[in-house]
Image (cartoon, rainbow, N blue to C red):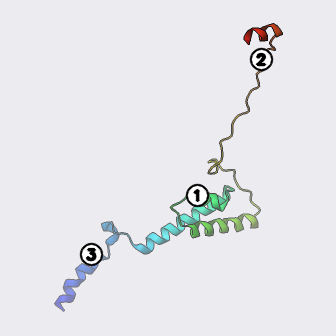
Amino acid sequence: MKRLLLALPLLAALSACEQLGIDDPAKTAALKEAEGKAIGSACRHAMRAIEDCYVLNPKAQKAAIYAGWREMDEYMRENKLEGVAPVVPRPGARPAQPAEEVVEKPAEKPAEKAKAH
């Protein structure tokens, strides 16, 4: 009986591990899964290919990204929603360059050409 009374405060203290900064592995896994799904959903809504999403988020779980991407794809198709153009360029894509202005040089006279050579 004395051991039970001594063990009770110890159990009460250990039940508050989160307050001590000790993470619960199940909660951490659920959080990573939820974050991956959110990333996948956002990628699909931004009209990104799933492969681009993987490259942009290398630390996220690929299975969770795919699940979120697929769920958002189904939702968008059912509700006939259009995606939003992404602001961040795709990996490996060159940034859009403004059209170069064509500046015409005045034609050289035959006499100036001869002097230049």
Asked whether disc 2 touches disc 1, contact meaning CB atoms under 8 Å apart, the reply is no
Q: How packed is label 1: few (under 14 Cα within 10 Å), some, or many (20 or more)?
A: few
Residue visible at 74% across and 33% down in the picture: 99
- Mark 3 highlights which residue? 13
Q: Earlier in the sequence, mark 3 or mark 2?
A: 3
Instruction: Please give the name of the residue rendered at 71% of the width and 34% of the height, measured from the top-left corner.
Output: 98
Amino acid of disc 3: Ala
Q: CA distance from mark 3 to mark 2?
A: 84 Å
- Looking at the rendered structure, the kind of residue marked 1 is Val
Q: Residue 26 at what x, y percent from top left?
A: 44, 75
Mark closest to the chain's N terminus, 1 or 3: 3
The residue to which callout 1 is attached is: 55
- In this view, 75 is above or below 93: below
Residue, x 53% and y 63% (percent of image)?
60
Vertical comparison of 22 with 55: above or below: below
Q: Name the foreground residue: 104 vs 29.
A: 104
Q: CA distance from mark 2 to mark 1?
A: 46 Å
The answer to whether residue 2 is left or right of residue 81 is: left
Q: Residue at x 64, y 61 (%)?
A: 51
Q: Position of residue 61 (x, y in %)?
A: 54, 67
Q: Label 3 near label 1: C-beta < 8 Å?
A: no
Which of disc 1 and disc 2 is earlier in sequence? 1
- The answer to which image quadrant residue 27 occupies is bottom left
Secondary structure of the residue carrying tag 2 is loop
Would you call the spot at circle 3 few (<14 residues within 10 Å), some (14-19), or many (20 or more)? few
Give the farthest residue toward the bottom. 1
Amino acid type, mark 2: Lys
Q: Where residue 105 is drawn, which disc sits there?
A: 2
Q: Position of residue 100 (x, y in %)?
A: 73, 30
